[in-house]
Amino acid sequence: MTDLTRLTAAEIAGLVAAGETSAVEVTQAHLDRIAAVDERVHAFLHVDSEGALAAARGVDERRAAGEDLGPLAGVPVAVKDVLTTKGVPTTVGSKILEGWRPPYDSTIVERLRAAGTVMLGKTNMDEFAMGSSTEYSAYGPTRNPWDLDRIPGGSGGGSAAALAAYEAPLSIGSDTGGSIRQPGAVTGTVGAKPTYGGTSRYGLVAFSSSLDTPGPCARNVLDAALLHQAIGGHDPRDSTSIPAPVPDVVGAAKLGASGDLTGVKLGVVTEFTGEGAEPGVMAAFRESVEALAKLGAEIVEVSCPHFQYALPAYYLIAPSECSSNLARFDGVRFGLRVGDDGNRSLEEVMSLTREAGFGPEVKRRIMVGTYALSSGYYDAYYGQAQKVRTLITRDFTAAFERVDALISPTTPFVAFPIGSRTADPYQMYLADLFTIPTNLYGGPAISVPCGLSEGLPVGFQIMAPTMADDRMYRVAAALESTVGTFTPPAL
Ligand code: GLN
């Protein structure tokens, strides 16, 4: 009998549409898998078995009634706990929102439901999406299915681990500085950060509003494109949403799968090819570049001189925005409230709530951001970082006059052991060295598995111009057609 948890999303939808299996059977198979392995992996913070089975029954009924179901109907999906889900706990990996059940669905979740996908539950993440390993979750770390003693990346480690552990065929992440792509890279899965504004932030708990971008995660490129298509596009409830249709990402993934890249010009980022990266990662990257050349792509080197300042600029801009966004967690409106005994002032209750509810990394960022925005320091820090952001955008614009897309490894290193980087925040920040420039620019980028180093997955990053998300899917699918997909050792 086919193991339904091993199928691609496209295969599952095909079987459901043909009546060869039911959405309920598929959902039950994934719930069983979660029950069998998630105690070890801890990808999920909340499993909504009842809600999932009810949604699956709805899909089966619609099929029985002869309705046209769409390309992802009946496919289970896991959702990062940063997105609001009506009546279903949403914690953002933080104690400050423990027990909060939002009164509304985020746009992404609404679209997932409309597409007939079945939401299995909410996945673990670094608190408020701040981190690169999921070790900063207030609810304990997620483990990498390739090696349970290693991190699954972050902040969306739960969404990536759920795919690699075959607990879900699709998942949703959010990418502010790399949190979709970096977990994808270290778990051997595909993660795509859409163009900023190409996917709605309505109902996405804000970290850094000018950077936050929800997006698709999957085990292969076509599935990621199908999910991207389902969740993307204009949303009038998000003022930064782009009023344009989603580029034809599904068509591009199918085109790329033919393995022909004739006429496509790719730029290797000079600044991202050595220092700070593990030799095994660079070796897998170079082999993949050769593979792309064999498929007909023209490869050139492109210098992006300001990319080296992306990390410091990001670590001023993101904390600045977070210090403002997180002011709403005051113990009055949502979740946790500490010390409200009738004798304390409002300020004391707020202060006790924030002291108990936020973890160390979140506090660090609020303090850095408050400092960078304070009068007297604003121009020296925040203002300067914004200027660097402009220079990085100009690097991208100049590069895309010469090439169709830029390429690099996704991360400088493979999955590291749990506990090995938490002592020094800077070591953790380095995980996003290659992913952050894209967020500052606002364009799309995808990570696709390209090989192994020391038995662990290596990710290949493709960065495209804004609103040319289709281009990165074409190149990613072409690479996948020659290197294949990667399966972790059995759990
Ligand atoms: N690791 C980066 C950070 O800690 C990026 C996080 C993200 O993309 N959400 O901010």
Image: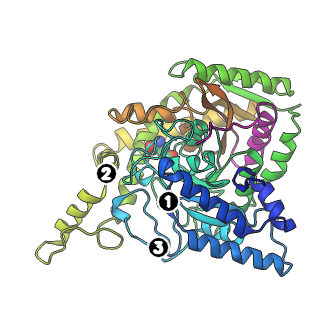
* Residue kind at label 3, given as amino acid type: Pro
The residue lying at 60 percent from left, 33 percent from top is 410
Judging depth in this view, the residue of 442 and 429 nearest the camera is 429
Dot 1 corresponds to which residue?
A: 81
Q: Secondary structure at mark 1?
A: loop
Tag 3: Cα neighbours inside 10 Å, few (<14), some, or many (≥20)?
Answer: some
Q: Secondary structure at mark 2?
A: loop
**Label 1, label 2: how far apart the Cα atoms are:** 16 Å
Specify whether 293 is left or right of 113: right
User: Residue 200, located in which quarter of the rendered image?
Assistant: bottom right
Who comes first in sequence, dot 1 or dot 2?
Answer: 1
Judging depth in this view, the residue of 339 and 44 nearest the camera is 44
Region rendered in magenta: 465-491
293 drawn magenta: no
Dot 2 corresponds to which residue?
A: 359
* Residue kind at label 2, given as amino acid type: Gly
* Residue kind at label 1, given as amino acid type: Asp
Who comes first in sequence, dot 2 or dot 3?
Answer: 3
Taking the image as drawn, is residue 217 in sight?
yes
Dot 3 corresponds to which residue?
A: 102
User: Residue 452, located in which quarter of the rendered image?
Assistant: top right
